[in-house]
Amino acid sequence: MTFDLSIRDALVVDGSGQPPRITDVHIEGGRICLIGPGPSGRREIAARGRALAPGFVDVHAHDDAALLSTPGLEFKLRQGVTSVVIGNCGFSLSPLLAGAAEPPGNASLFPGFFERFLDLDAYRDAFVAAGPAVNAISLVGHNAIRSHVMGNDEREPSEAEIASMRGHLRRALEQGAAGFSTGLIYRPGRVATTAEIIEVARPLAEYQALFTTHMRSEGDRLLESVEETLRIADAVGCRAQISHHKAGGKRNWGKVKASLARIDSANRAGADVSLDVYPYIAGSGPMIEYFDPLKIDLSLAEIIQIASCPGRPAYDGRRLTEIAASEGLGLAELVQRILELPGAERTVAITFMMAEEDVETNLRHPRVMVGSDGLPNPEGRPHPRLYGTFPRVISEYGRKRGLFTLEAAVAKMSSLPCERFGLRDRGRIAVGQFADLLLFDPETIVDRATYAEPKQYPTGIDLVLVNGSIAVEGGRTTDVRAGRLLRFNK
Ligand SMILES: [Zn+2]
């Protein structure tokens, strides 16, 4: 008897949160088939001194288009990410039709990608044809559904339109979606009432699928927004996930404590709410969605760095305050000009809005997992979270600051997300689980992406397996692309 692959003497951090132990892991037919001593494999890997963990799951990705257009997804794979959750913040590539109405945010979330799909099965066909290097599971976005059904009109839907939106959600769930996402600060979702979200989200209960939400406010009205989320989940009878939980804006710093306390008390009373966070103090998103051109918010402009500005690439990587000073412009005037440049709908901003202490409070919480929220834009200088998130949780927040043990960090990035997003046979090193794995040096693994030089891969990760196939070896990507579009399996 011999197996496809045997990894010897690894420090196995199995995803359960239990202390690691040194042993062998054997793989056959894409799955883990034996843990412990066994016969020589057709391929042997000596792993002494390195840790073997379940592949990381990025629960908050916007890789919907990148999976099809740049299927190597090296920026994810080289962080040890083997699965991504797409369709976040209300934005998914289905249900939509190319050339028809779609959410304005799509231009910067999916830059240079113009294919659209009528349903998740149509997206699945394109996914299979592209053959990405990592697995994905999709949410279906409220912004997408709403634009598809009623255009970008800022009005209330009719009964018939509600029923049609609900039908699209049901169809996506039938086709394997993990749940329904909202982006309630973005167009057109921000005009939706709580009642509209509840009525559209109804099918989630039947499928035991997840309601995920970029809430209506992540600053001044954070606590009210948490109440809205709890109300929606309670009315629908579903589990909820609060996306990129934060308290933005100096006057709101510290509020995450009250927000988490409220969620804890709701969970004790029978709700089922979890959250995700990225390990940085800056956020990032489409600049046109942040500003009302008639009333430029200067306190926001003061904390913005341009990630990519297609109309003026010389701005990429620079703070607005610095550009304004060097061009002799007022800040409001500069923002106004940027919003009027050709291609302004694709301009992406990085916003330094959080307190480091809040990031730590979030990461420490047992119901908080990790989502990069990375915007995979080949242009400019993207937020470093795109290249650094997962190693950074281990190196900066685990090893350096001592927020948690290695095994706790790994659980947060593997088993916890798999339980929440219905990836039943992934997220742990156990017999029968798919062999999504990474091998790394726990003493040296480190993120290298910075705000100035974001496109830098982490170091310390030697080997990444996706569905039992070697996708990264000796720290470099192979040509193997073994990712699958997964189906929700609660
Ligand atoms: Zn979001």
Image: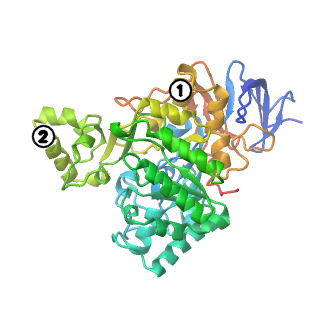
Secondary structure at numbered mark 2? loop
Q: Is residue 283 left or right of residue 368?
A: left
Quadrant housing residue 294: bottom left
Of the two numbered discs 1 and 2 on the same chain, state the one appearing first in sequence: 2
* Quadrant of the rendering where the C terminus is positioned: bottom right
Residue type beneath disc 2:
Gly
Q: At which x and y percent is residue 276?
A: 53, 43
Which colour assignment does the render follow? rainbow
Marking on residue 219 = none
Question: Who is closer to the viewer here, 330 or 386?
Answer: 330
Residue type beneath disc 1:
Tyr
Instruction: Examine the rendering and report whether any part of residue 97 can be seen.
Output: no
Name the residue that disc number 1 marks.
397
Marking on residue 330 = 2
CA distance separating discs 1 and 2: 38 Å
Q: At which x and y percent is residue 288?
A: 28, 53
Q: Is residue 86 left or right of residue 297?
A: right
Q: Mark 1: few, some, or many residues within 10 Å (few <14, many ≥20)?
A: many
Q: Is residue 444 left or right of residue 222?
A: right
Q: Is mark 1 within 8 Å of ligand 1?
A: no
- Asked if 396 appears above or below 330 in the picture, the reply is above
- Asked if 229 appears above or below 451 in the picture, the reply is below
Question: Who is closer to the viewer here, 59 or 317?
Answer: 59
Q: Mark 2: few, some, or many residues within 10 Å (few <14, many ≥20)?
A: some
* Quadrant of the rendering where the N terminus is positioned: top right
Q: At which x and y percent is residue 150?
A: 40, 74
Most distant residue in the right direction = 1
Q: Residue at x 29, y 34 (%)?
A: 317
Instruction: Examine the rendering and report whether any part of residue 248 can be seen.
Output: yes
Residue contact at pointers 1 and 2, CB within 8 angstroms: no
Q: Residue at x 14, y 45 (%)?
A: 333
Question: Who is closer to the viewer here, 389 or 400?
Answer: 400
